[in-house]
C-alpha cells in the first residue's frame, strides 16, 4: 500500500528537534551546546512552517539540510572518536575537521584542533599540544577543563594530571559525581593507576559506579574498565575488551594486553613491550611503553572486595559480548545478508518490471491482497515480504534488518533467526489479510517486510529482557531503546494512515513470543578464565 515518505520525514524532523532540546535541558548543557540548540529550534520552525504551507513536499526539501548539518557532523565526529580509540590520530583529525566545517559551533572546532595536535605528538612533535595546553590553561569552563586533562593524559603527564584532578571539586571527599563529571573520573582512574595507586583507582570507580551506569556512557565505562582490568592483572578480560573497542590487532591492544600480563606477574612481558616500541612509529605509544617499563604495575595483593569489583567488571565484558550491539566476536550474519539481498532483488525486479510504485506490477510479482491469498494463492504471504512500495520503504526496512539482524542471528542461530523472520512476516501478512477480509480494515494491497522487521524488534526485546533478568545493565538500557522504537512506530502508524499498523503490531507480538523460546547455547566464561 502507498507509503507517505514526506510525512514520515516531517515527523522525524520534529521528533529530532524536540529530542535535542529535551536532552540539552536534562543534561544542563544548553550553554555549552548552544549551536545544536539553535539548529534544532531553526529546524523545528522550518518544519512546522513547511508542513503548514507546503505539506506535500516540505519533507523532501528539508531532508537535505537535515542530513548535511545535523546527521553528517555527528557521524563524522563519531568516526573520529573511533579513530582515537585505535590511535589513528591523522585520520581522526581529518574526520573532526570535516565535522567542524559543517558545525563550526560548540566544541567541534576545538576537538579538531586537539586531534591535530595529537597527530603531531604521535609524529614526535609535542610543541602544538604544549602550546594548546598553555592557551587553554587561562580559560574557564568544562570544555577547556576536559581538553586540558585529555592533553595531559596523551602527553603522559601523569603526576600533573593527578594533582589537577585532586584539586577539582568533584574529587573532594563526600562528593557524589554527576554525569558531567564522569569524564573527570575516567582521567582520575587512569592517572592513579599510572602513578601506582591502583587501589585508590578502584575506590574511585566504586564511588561513581552507580552514576556511570545510570548515565549509560558505555564507551567511557569500557575505557575505565580497560584500565582497571589491565592494572588488576586480568589479561583475558582485557583481550576481550580491546576487541570490543575495535583494537584487537593494533599496537594499542597489544600494549594493554601486555600491561595486564605484566600486572599478573607473567615473565617475558618486558621484552615483548620493548619489541613493540621498536616496531611502532607512534612516538606517544613509545613514551607510554617507556613509562610502563620504568614504572611497571604493582603486583600487591588486592582485598577481597577489590577482587569482587574486578570480577564484576569482567562479567560485564562478557555480558556486553552477549547483549551489546556490534560485538566483534560474533559470527558473520549470513542469514541477515541473504534476506537483505532478497529484498534488493525484489526491488530490482519491480523496478525492471514497471516500477516499485506501480500497483499492477507489484500484484503481478506477488503482492498480497485478501481476495487472492484465500483463493488458492497463499504463497503471496511470503512473496509480499520482499516487495516494497518505493525505494524509501525498502531502504528503511533494509537499515532496520541490518541493525537488528546480526545481533539476533548470533543469539538464535541462523535457522531459528530465519524462522522468526519468516514466521513474523508471514503471520503478520495473513492476520492483516484476515482483518481486511472481515472488513475490520479497508481492503488494499500489502507489500513490505515491515511485519517481519517488527518481529525482529519483538524478538530482540525478548532476548534483552532475558539479559536484564540476568543482571546486565547494558541489556536494560538497550531494552529501553527498543521500547522507544516501539512507541515511535505506534505514533507513525497512527499519524500515517497508509502504513499498516496491524501488520506491525502482529509482527511485534509474534517476534516477541518466538524470542522468549530458550536461547541458543552460548559458551560460558567465568571471571579470571
Image (cartoon, rainbow, N blue to C red):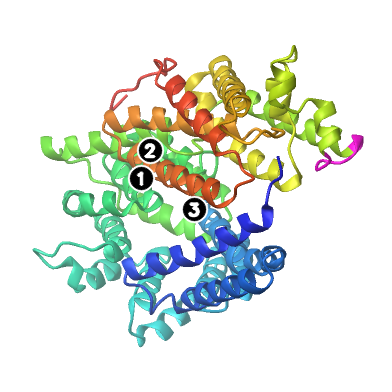
Left or right, 421 with reference to 166: right
Residue in view at x 49 percent, y 25 percent: 511
Left or right, 33 with reference to 381: left
* x and y percentages locating residue 517 in the rendered image: 41, 16
Residue in view at x 68 percent, y 53 percent: 5
Q: Secondary structure at mark 2?
A: helix
Q: Is residue 413 above or below residue 112?
A: above
The residue nearer to you, when weighing 130 against 112, is 112
The quadrant the N terminus occupies is: top right
Around disc 3, counting alpha carbons within 10 Å, would you say few (fewer than 14), some (14 to 19), or many (20 or more)? Answer: some
* x and y percentages locating residue 302 in the rendered image: 15, 39
Residue in view at x 61 percent, y 37 percent: 402
Left or right, 209 with reference to 37: left
Query: Where, by quadrant of the figure, is residue 396 drawn?
Result: top right
Residue that badge 3 annotates: 85
Residue that badge 1 annotates: 226
Q: Secondary structure at mark 1?
A: helix
What whole-number distance in Å separates the C-alpha atoms at marks 1 and 2?
6 Å
Please state the extent of the stretch shown in magenta in the rendering. Answer: 352-358
Give me the disc on residue 133. none
**Residue 250 within the segment the image draws in magenta:** no
Closer to the chain start, of discs 1 and 2, is: 1
The residue nearer to you, when weighing 307 against 508, is 508
In this orientation, does residue 233 appear? no
Closer to the chain start, of discs 3 and 2, is: 3
What whole-number distance in Å separates the C-alpha atoms at marks 3 and 2?
14 Å
Principal secondary structure, stretch drawn in magenta: loop
Residue that badge 2 annotates: 238
Amino acid at each position: 500500500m502507498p507509503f507517505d515518505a514526506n510525512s514520515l520525514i516531517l515527523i522525524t524532523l520534529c521528533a529530532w528537534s524536540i529530542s535535542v532540546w529535551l536532552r540539552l535541558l536534562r543534561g544542563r548543557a544548553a550553554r555549552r551546546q548552544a549551536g545544536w540548540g539553535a539548529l534544532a529550534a531553526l529546524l523545528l520552525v522550518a518544519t512546522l512552517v513547511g508542513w503548514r504551507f507546503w505539506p506535500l513536499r516540505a519533507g523532501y526539501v528539508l531532508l537535505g539540510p537535515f542530513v548535511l548539518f545535523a546527521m553528517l557532523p555527528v557521524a563524522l565526529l563519531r568516526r573520529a572518536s573511533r579513530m582515537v580509540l585505535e590511535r589513528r590520530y591523522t585520520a581522526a583529525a581529518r574526520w573532526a575537521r570535516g565535522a567542524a566545517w559543517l558545525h563550526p559551533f560548540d566544541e567541534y572546532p576545538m576537538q579538531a584542533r586537539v586531534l591535530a595536535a595529537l597527530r603531531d605528538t604521535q609524529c614526535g612533535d609535542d610543541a602544538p599540544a604544549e602550546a594548546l595546553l598553555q592557551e587553554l590553561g587561562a580559560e574557564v569552563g568544562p570544555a577547556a577543563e576536559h581538553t586540558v586533562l585529555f592533553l595531559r593524559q596523551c602527553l603522559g603527564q601523569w603526576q600533573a594530571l593527578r594533582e589537577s584532578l585532586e584539586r577539582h571539586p568533584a574529587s573532594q571527599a563526600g562528593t557524589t559525581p554527576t554525569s558531567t563529571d564522569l569524564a573527570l573520573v575516567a582521567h582520575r582512574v587512569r592517572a592513579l593507576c599510572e602513578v601506582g595507586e591502583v587501589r585508590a583507582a578502584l575506590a574511585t570507580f566504586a564511588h561513581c559506579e552507580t552514576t556511570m551506569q545510570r548515565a549509560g556512557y558505555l564507551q567511557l565505562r569500557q575505557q575505565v574498565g580497560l584500565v582497571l582490568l589491565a592494572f588488576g592483572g586480568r589479561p583475558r578480560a582485557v583481550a576481550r575488551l580491546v576487541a570490543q573497542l575495535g583494537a584487537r590487532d593494533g599496537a594499542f591492544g597489544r600494549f594493554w594486553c601486555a600491561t595486564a600480563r605484566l600486572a599478573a606477574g607473567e615473565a617475558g612481558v618486558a621484552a615483548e613491550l620493548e619489541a613493540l616500541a621498536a616496531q611502532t612509529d607512534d612516538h606517544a605509544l613509545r613514551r607510554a611503553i617507556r613509562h610502563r617499563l620504568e614504572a611497571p604495575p604493582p603486583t600487591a595483593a588486592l582485598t577481597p572486595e577489590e577482587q569482587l569489583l574486578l570480577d564484576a567488571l569482567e562479567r560485564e565484558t562478557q555480558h556486553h559480548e552477549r547483549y551489546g550491539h556490534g560485538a566483534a566476536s560474533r559470527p558473520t550474519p549470513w542469514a541477515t545478508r541473504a534476506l537483505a539481498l532478497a529484498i534488493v532483488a525484489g526491488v530490482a525486479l519491480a523496478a525492471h518490471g514497471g516500477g516499485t510504485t506501480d500497483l499492477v506490477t507489484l500484484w503481478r510479482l506477488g503482492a498480497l491482497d485478501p481476495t487472492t491469498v484465500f483463493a488458492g494463492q497463499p504463497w503471496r504471504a511470503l512473496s509480499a515480504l520482499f516487495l516494497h512500495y518505493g525505494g524509501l520503504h525498502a531502504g528503511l526496512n533494509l537499515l532496520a534488518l541490518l541493525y537488528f539482524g546480526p545481533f539476533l542471528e548470533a543469539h538464535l542461530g541462523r535457522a531459528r533467526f530465519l524462522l522468526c523472520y519468516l514466521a513474523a512476516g508471514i503471520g503478520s501478512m495473513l492476520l492483516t489479510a484476515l482483518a481486511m477480509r472481515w472488513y475490520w480494515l479497508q481492503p488494499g494491497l500489502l507489500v513490505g517486510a515491515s511485519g517481519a522487521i517488527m518481529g525482529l524488534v519483538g524478538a530482540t526485546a525478548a532476548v534483552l529482557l532475558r539479559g536484564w533478568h540476568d543482571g546486565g545493565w547494558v541489556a536494560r538500557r538497550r531494552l529501553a531503546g527498543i521500547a522507544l522504537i516501539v512507541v515511535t512506530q505506534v505514533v507513525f502508524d497512527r499519524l500515517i494512515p497508509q502504513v499498516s499498523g496491524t501488520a506491525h503490531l502482529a509482527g511485534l507480538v509474534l517476534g516477541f513470543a518466538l524470542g522468549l523460546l530458550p536461547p541458543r547455547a552460548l559458551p560460558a566464561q567465568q571471571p579470571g578464565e
